[in-house]
Amino acid sequence: MKCIIFDLDGTLWDSSENVALSWTDTAKRIGVDKNFTPELLQSGMGKTMTELADMYFPEFSPQRRMELLQLCMDSENEYIWAHGGVLFENEEQTLSALRARNKLYIVSNCQCGYIEAFLHSTGYSGYFDGHMCWGDTRQPKARTIRALIERESCLDPVYVGDTQGDCDASYEAGVPFIHAAYGFGKISTPERVIAVAESFISLSDIL
């Protein structure tokens, strides 16, 4: 069976509005003057946690940036667990069809607990065979992809993601890349893309 590895944000859902609410509330609670918007958070999708800390809290020391980011992520996990995000049209139907003939996984640059919150809030646990994230490996996404492939003994893997960072990570990991063009990002290196999904349901035709 083919192993299909999905990115999460912008590929399996859009949680940016709820994450923005959570982060803004957390910032106010700890006395940091920040207003997070969905657009601001979407601009950081695909980046590592260290890059996000530098991007969102540049006025603080590197150590404090990571402390603030961790506080936001902890609150985010709780909020997303309860409130979820916005799913794409025909998503569950497509996942069900794909799961019937493939093994499905998730690899994201997120913190531990976020993928679990996605699976809980959507009820999608039964569609996925496993997952791995930056919080598990503390490594760039390419290495996390390779780590999951090795752990799961994946045969014939492909990676589905929406950003240039996803494309680069897939290429570096030696895995064919499918661009989820319905998501947040655009791809500047189309030669690294083996297929383009213009909608979630079109993944059924590609895969």
Image (tube, rainbow, N blue to C red):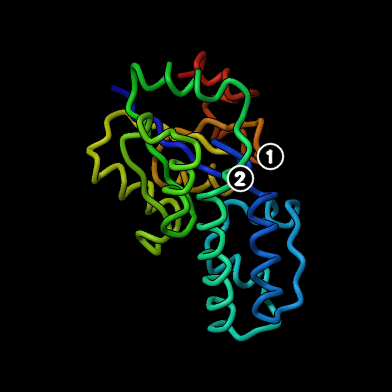
Numbered label attached to residue 164: 2
Q: Quadrant of residue 13?
A: top right
Q: Which residue is situated farthest in the top direction here?
A: 205
Give residue 155's position: percent from left, percent from top.
Answer: 27, 30
Q: Are marks 2 and 1 in contact (CB under 8 Å)?
A: yes
Circle 2 packing at 10 Å, graded few (<14), some (14-19), many (20+), is some
Q: Between 14 and 154, which is closer to the camera in this rendering?
A: 14
Q: Under tag 1, what secondary structure?
A: loop
Q: Secondary structure at mark 2?
A: helix
N-terminal-most mark, 2 or 1: 2
Residue at the spot 60% in from the left edge and 71% down from the top edge:
53
Residue at x-position 57% and y-position 44%:
84
Q: Is residue 55 above or below residue 204?
A: below
Residue carrying label 1: 186
Answer few, some or many: residues within 10 Å of disc 1's Cα (few below 14, many 20 plus, some between 14 and 19): some
* Residue at the extreme bottom: 61
In the rendered structure, the answer to whether residue 182 lies left or right of residue 79 reads right
Residue 189, percent from left and from top: 62, 39
- Between 155 and 103, the one nearer to me in the picture: 103
* Quarter of the rendering occupied by the N terminus: top left
Which residue type carries mark 2?
Answer: Gln
Q: CA distance from mark 2 to mark 1?
A: 6 Å
Query: Quick one: quadrant of the C terminus?
Result: top left
Residue at horizontal 35%, vertical 59%? 136
On screen, residue 69 above or below 38: below
From this view, report whether residue 76 is shown above or below residue 69.
above
In the picture, the disc for residue 126 is none
Q: Position of residue 179 (x, y in %)?
A: 58, 32
- The answer to whether residue 181 is left or right of residue 159 is right
Please identify the quarter of the rendering in which residue 89 is found. Answer: top right
Q: Residue at x 58, y 67 (%)?
A: 72
Name the amino acid, label 1: Lys
